[in-house]
Amino acid sequence: MSDKVLLQVRDLATEFATRSGVARAVDGVSFDVHAGEIIGLVGESGSGKSVTGYSILGLIDPPGRVAAGSVKLDGQELVGMPRAQLRALRGRRIAMVFQDPMSTLNAVLKVSTQMELAMRAHGKPGKQEMRKRSLEALAKVGIPDPERRLDAYPHELSGGMRQRVAIAIAFLNNPGLVICDEPTTALDVSIQAQILIEMRTLVREAGVSLVWISHDLATVSVLASRLLVMYAGRLIEEGPTAEVLRRPHHPYTQGLIDSLPSRAAPGKDLLQIPGSTPSLTALPSGCAFKDRCAHATAACDTAPQQTIAAPRTWRCHHPLNMDTATAAQATP
Amino acid sequence: MINQTRFIGLEAITRRFASVPPLSERLAKRITGQKASTTVVHAVEDVSLSVAKGETLGLVGESGCGKSTLGRVAAGILAPTLGEAHIDGAAVMRGGRKNTTRVQMVFQDPFASLNPRMRIGDTIAEGPIAHGLVQKSEAAADVVRWLKAVGLDADAAQRFPHQFSGGQRQRVAIARALAMRPDALVCDEPVASLDVSIQAQIINLFLQLRRDLNLTMLFISHDLSVVRHVSDRVAIMYLGRIVELGATEDIFLTPRHPYTSALLASAPRLAADGAPVQEIEPISGELPSPINPPPGCAFHQRCSFAQPRCQQERPLLRAGGTAREVACHFPLQEEKQP
């Protein structure tokens, strides 16, 4: 990992017009991704983690729109970039891996054809070269007998193999940044472990940056060196993985960790976060988490600003696990 | 707490699914004088299990290992090809309504398992009314009782599934199962589709119901930490067979089957102090096909301890120590406690 900032997201806001009003799925999200870094973007359904990923790639379709903010890749602004330019960039410099490979791969095209399409979108490679590159890419993601798999259709592959093909396609054009949206959620534990380890090797060798979106804290923490936690469209906490997990500052992060079954004695009740995620069109004023929070006070009726105490940031009036040193260092 | 009677009894259950090739293929084969071959999926092979009254047995395995099929056989939804499923000594598939409704099921996806066009109240009351457990006139009160039991308000009865979140829907699905006054519940991945914070609420609900109603449960899941939390005993399945069975903490602390051990090592987890565990060890290879199960031990191709014997002779599930059963020729030794 280097100090060079590859992706810079500032005050990103993405809105969807719905019947019950405008839903701000992403609300003022800012973060950096350094070259060669793996960051984990964590949150529950509706927290805006996937929409953040889609917004970076310019994949928000009406009635949704990126309402405000900036996304810079290597200094180049992506928000508002003309479609053709964005198309040339997608797959070449930023790629994405989605959750369900059965719906992202084309069911009626052979693996080889789909890989060729991805390469031809960004150049005019010859038939031989494409085959060579495809075989290399498949071998790199741990597909045994790539020669044979190249002629297979997606339905002939297992779920794990399909996701490997999707990952191989994402890495085909040597992008600088790959956004993975829950790529192992649909897979079995043993296959998930294989892919996690392969991803780690792939990232180290290719020097790419990875944004790993997931709802699963444990899975994300295998790979990510930094964690970003989202709740109701806002980034509520950020910091090095081990620190965030050991000493979470935001009560929501603490709640997420505490509600894991492994945190309670077997058979004993789990600590649960009461209530459920609020609807994005009817968010409470102030802190969106206050109705579910045990630490909420009158102060929480005003929205908390982001507190930055590098390398950690949080957005809470009553942060937890603070020692005096961190508190003094904090500048609101 | 638990008396050692066989409450749910699965005796030598085998369930195969045959897929007949399409007509065109069969005709073509007949014209050319070949025999049309049907492919047989060996979903569950010779599994015997028992669950005591008030006990929760966790059934763990990866997709395609046959755990859901076994659950459906136990609930009397699927007839086994061989063997018989019992509840409290009676065969669940025989004796008509008296027995077939004694085991109820909670499914994974409450978006799919609830009828979107039926009000919640009607969904919950339908079974009990049809089976004469409650009179139509008393059904509304009965519905409210079960809604309360799962932590929902009485006015939920008038609403439709789409008006509820995933966690609330799963509560409705549980209320529907409970309204049938079951003797046992088969829960097939009941928290897999829920968010972490909601998952904790539903797990707590199961724990509470088990305390209040002395429920007997077969709890099917691929999530090791969930199973560890709710189960008294755990059975690990691999390719249609049980490879290890024992008390939950014994299995998790000293796994004796190499598959159990490898499965535990490959699961992402957090350490006790919350620190991430970055050293996970994946199992090599993939699950073999249940259409052509490998000879010998089904796990031998992926096992780092496999010997020539494992390729030829299938290990039987046998007792190894107290209430511990392992199907392995070379089980891992229990670590000596200092």
Image: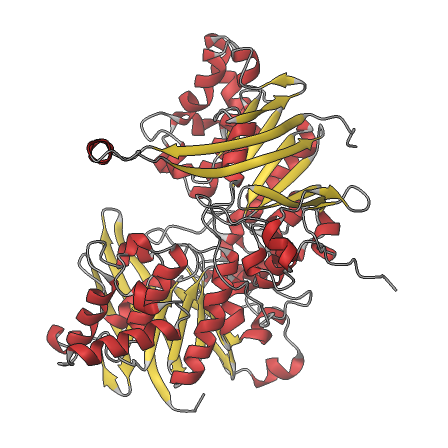
Q: Position of residue B63 (x, y in %)?
A: 48, 48
Quadrant that contains the C terminus of chain B: bottom right
Q: Position of residue A137 (x, y in %)?
A: 33, 75
Q: Is A149 situated left or right of A248 in this image?
A: left
Q: Is A188 situated left or right of A12 in this image?
A: right
Q: Is A221 situated left or right of A62 in this image?
A: right
Q: Position of residue A225 (x, y in %)?
A: 51, 78
Q: Position of residue B117 (x, y in %)?
A: 31, 27
Question: Which quadrant of the view contains residue A29?
Answer: bottom left
| Front-most of residues A127 and A88 | A127
| Front-most of residues A311 and B66 | B66
Residue A294 visible? The answer is: yes
Residue at the spot x=67%, y=44% of the render? Answer: B234
Residue at the spot x=49%, y=71% of the render? Answer: A197
Number of numbered markers: 0
> Compared to B255, does A85 lie above or below?
below
> Which residue is farthest bottom?
A3
